[in-house]
Image: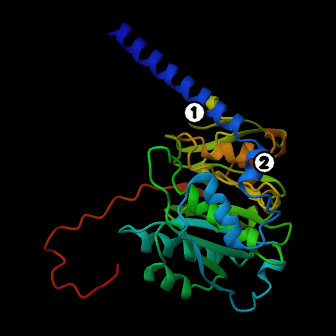
Amino acid sequence: MAAAWRTVVLSALVGLAVLRLGYLELTAGLGAEAWKNALDNTNPPSSHASGAHAHRRLLGVSSTQELITKKPATGANDSHAVPTVYVITPTYERLTQKADLTRLMHTLMVATRTASIFWIVVEDAPGPSKLVSSLLARSELPYAHLYQQSAKGEDVHLKAGATRNEGVLYLRSLKPPPHPDSVVYFADDDNVYDDRLFAEILTVRNIGVWPVGYSGQRRAEFPYIKNGRVTGFNSYLAYLRRFPMDMASFAINIKYFLREVPLLFDPKAPPVFGETMLLESTGESWDTLEPKAANCSQVLVWHIQVVKPIIKPGYDRGNHIAEV
C-alpha cells in the first residue's frame, strides 16, 4: 500500500514539473516584442475598437465587444480626473447572477464613502442582457457596461481572461486618460468584499497585496511579511509560481495598463498560472509588493461557495415573478 501511494505522489510531482516547464516555455516565448507586434504598435490605441481587435488577433477572441453605456454618478462627471479604483467585474448568465451582482453593487456603493470607484462590468455574452443593464442603471455608481463573447476551446484555460482584458482595453481608450494614481482591481461577482478594502486599494502605488479568506484549500491564503516586506506566500502551489496569488488578493496601479505594451491576461495560460503570468509581466519583484490590510493580518475579501439553488420541476408553475 505504501509503495502504491509513493507511486501516485511521484506521478503527481512529475506532472506538476511538466506543467511548470510548459509555463516557462510559454512565458519565454511571449516577450514584449511579441505583444508590441500583436497590438500593431498602438501607443496607446487611438480608439477602443482598434486596440480590442489587435488584442483579439493575438489571443483568438471573438469580436462582439461593444461599450454599451457609461453613467457618471451625480457630481462625478470628472471621476476619471481624480485617483479612482477601477473595479473590473466579469460576469456571465446563471441562476445566482442577479443576487451576486446586487451584493457587489451595494458593497461598492458603501465603499464610495471613502474611495472614488468606477465599476466596469463585462458580460461574457454575444450582447448585453436586460438583467445587467437594469441593475447598473439603478446603481449610484459611475460605470461602464461591456460585453465580450469568450472564445471556447481546449487551449483556453483562464476563466474570464478575455472579459477582464476588455475592461483593460476600455481603460486604455479613455481620453483624457485616468488619473495616474488610480488603481485597477479585478473583482469577481461571486466573492464577498469588505467595503474597507477599496480605501486600502486606493493607496497602492505599484502592486498591493493582502490575504483572501477560504481560498486555496485553506482558511486564508496570505503573504508572509517581515519588516514590512513580502518574503513568501502561504498559498496553493506556491512552489510552482513566482507570484502564487489569487485574483482577489492584489490590485495594480493603472500605469502598468497604460504602457505601450499593455498588461493583459492570456486566456491560454495553464491552469492556476493566469495571475502569476500577469504579475510577472509588470517586471516587479516581491520586494516591491505593498502589504495592505494591516500588514496582511486582516481578511477583507472571501471566496464563498454558493450552493446552487434547487428548483424542482413544476414547483414554479403559475409563478408571476419573471426574474429572480
Q: Residue visible at 60% across and 41% down?
A: 273
Q: Position of residue 168 (x, y in %)?
A: 69, 64
Q: Quadrant of residue 179?
A: bottom right
Q: Nearer the viewer, residue 97 or 16?
A: 16
Q: Residue visible at 82% across and 54% down?
A: 206
Q: Which mark is residue 282?
A: 2
Q: Which mark is residue 237?
A: 1
* Above/below status of 213 relative to 197: above
* Above/below status of 252 relative to 24: below
| Label 2 Cα crowd, 10 Å radius (few <14 / some 14-19 / many 20+) | some
* Above/below status of 152 relative to 6: below
Q: Position of residue 244 (x, y in %)?
A: 64, 39
Looking at the image, the residue that sits furthest to the top is 3
Q: Nearer the viewer, residue 84 or 67?
A: 67
Q: Residue visible at 63% across and 60% down?
A: 165
Left/right placement of residue 40 relative to residue 100 reads: right
Left/right placement of residue 287 relative to residue 88 reads: right
Q: Nearer the viewer, residue 52 or 145?
A: 52
| Label 1 Cα crowd, 10 Å radius (few <14 / some 14-19 / many 20+) | some
Label 1 secondary element: loop
Residue 318 visible in this rendered orientation of the protein: yes
